[in-house]
Amino acid sequence: MLSDVMEDYLKAIYVLQTESGPPVSTSAIAERVGKTPPTVTSMLETLEERGLVEREKYKGAELTEEGRTVALEVLRHHRLLEAYLAERLDYSWSEVHEEADALEHHISEEFERRVASALGDPAVDPHGDPIPGADLEPPADDDTRPLTEVAVGDRVVIARVSDRDDEELEYLDRAGITPGTTVEVVDIAPFGMVTVVGGPDREPHGSDADGDGGEREQSLPEAIAGAVRVRPVEEVNGAAATDAGVGGA
Amino acid sequence: MLSDVMEDYLKAIYVLQTESGPPVSTSAIAERVGKTPPTVTSMLETLEERGLVEREKYKGAELTEEGRTVALEVLRHHRLLEAYLAERLDYSWSEVHEEADALEHHISEEFERRVASALGDPAVDPHGDPIPGADLEPPADDDTRPLTEVAVGDRVVIARVSDRDDEELEYLDRAGITPGTTVEVVDIAPFGMVTVVGGPDREPHGSDADGDGGEREQSLPEAIAGAVRVRPVEEVNGAAATDAGVGGA
DNA sequence: GTGAAGGATTAGACGAGTCTAACTGAAATA
DNA sequence: TATTTCAGTTAGACTCGTCTAATCCTTCAC
Ligand SMILES: [Mn+2]
Ligand SMILES: [Mn+2]
Ligand SMILES: [Mn+2]
Ligand SMILES: [Mn+2]
């Protein structure tokens, strides 16, 4: 049996790995899990003995297949919980993360199944992050890119927002930058400040309590914009069908 | 902040204390939490330093008011979770305990509030155990007694079943001895074997999937019967109104 | 009142997870 | 290539929760 601490390390390595590819550095892990580098070194040794990571001294670490499966398991728990809390217990989009972080290590497989089926096996969590399937196969790379890398004039759909920083999340929530929203990038200033216009073009499931659902122009600092990932608007059938499945509730 | 381990000890002491009154012996606690007596001694010292228990060497331990409040907090979490799992995630009556035991230490106060209000502030969990209120005041002693102490011929309502033993629970579930059911005690044999007749006299909320909801005579061994607590049938308004609020779902 | 018997405590050890301080190696710079 | 910088590792210590083995009360039977 793995401790919840180990699960957290594996999850951290997985995410870092998908963000910037292996190998993952000791300090990056340390930063992510909020521990000191020596602590991480020693945990990596443990994890290596258990066959969950491979490691080259002074270089970095990489998950084995087994380690990756564990990470996906934890991530599945985390994101299913987020989805459930938002959908069934009225959590807001930005409140969900901390709770899921605590619970993800303590639910049974039975609980996982029941939650998944209660929600109809959702594909993404409220932040737009993909929920790994029950098979725990690594999901295909997505087609999103950071908002900072969009060309001026493009219309894009908000796909994912990082769920790591509460303040960022509150900011985006108030700004109406939520998964599923379509925006147009009208300017990119020096230092990465991105100005967008748009907002929830229709009410997806009746959230949007602050009745300003319309056109609005706002500028996002680089730190924020970089944490938002978008995909191109898809013109599916003549009409613009954009925010399917990622409703704001 | 208290560890989940400490919470488990406090909960154990609380329950033992309500079962047989303080002081609670080291070995009783050890047995309940599944640790050895020396481990318990040392944890009791820690708990005493923290002001959560009072203790007399070689005698036993007792919760302080603060310790009792913590215990009630954990118990509230546990029982709310049990109720939620049964009501909203289709857990059966007997599956619920283990899951709640793991989660009870890891939910936030926010989660507690949302679950409680989603269920309409339930008063009892699916085993019939009272759910401590949000004020965490000790609940009044209940009016139940073990099935083994009922006089032959009495009609009683099943009030609570111990949630500690899975096998016992399965047994009772199959036997149709569930909270809210009315039975009549027809015999008490030597060694405490109790024979009852009865069963779910009406379907409370549509559970009772095995369509045998009628009169049935069965004998329960002492070990089982002793874990079932009952209260007298209340003749509320002429009609017998018995199984309110403890529905089987 | 004395002596078992048995529960409780002390003694000592251990693994997990964490830290700080000191050191080492690798990579970038000049 | 030699040097510097800084990330990564080693060393050593500490807390928490746990155990086994040994010892110490208390109590109950006689
Ligand atoms: Mn998340
Ligand atoms: Mn799982
Ligand atoms: Mn229970
Ligand atoms: Mn609480």
Image: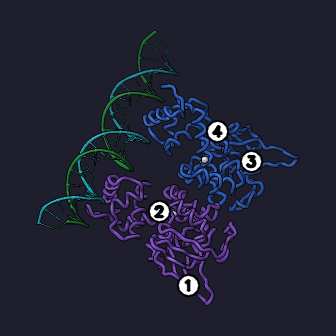
Chain colours: A purple, B blue, C green, D cyan
Give the CA separation, mark 4 to mark 2.
48 Å
Q: Are marks 3 and 4 in contact (CB under 8 Å)?
A: no
Query: What residue sits right under mark 2 in the picture?
Result: A74
Q: Is residue A55 above or below residue A140?
A: above
Disc number placed over residue B68 in the picture, else none? none
Q: What's under tag 2, amino acid-wise? A: Val
The residue furthest bottom is A238
The chain under label 3 reads B
Query: What residue sits right under mark 1 in the picture?
Result: A234
Q: What's under tag 3, amino acid-wise? A: Val
Name the mark nearer the viewer: 3 or 2: 2
Point 62% across, 61% down: residue = A91
Give the CA separation, mark 3 to mark 2.
46 Å
Disc number placed over residue B183 in the picture, else none? 3
Dot 2 beta carbon under 8 Å from ligand 2: no
Crowdedness of circle 1 by 10 Å Cα count: few (<14), some, many (20+)? some
- Quarter of the image where one finds residue B11: top right
Q: Is residue B160 visible?
A: yes
Do the residues at discs 1 and 2 belong to one chain?
yes
Name the secondary structure under disc 3. strand
The chain under label 2 reads A
- Residue B40 percent across, percent down from the top left: 46, 36
Query: What residue sits right under mark 4 in the picture?
Result: B192
The quadrant of the rendering that contains the N terminus of chain A is bottom left
Residue nearer the viewer, A168 or A193: A193
Q: Are marks 1 and 2 in contact (CB under 8 Å)?
A: no
Name the secondary structure under disc 1. loop
Point 88% across, 46% down: residue = B238
The chain under label 4 reads B
Name the mark nearer the viewer: 3 or 4: 3
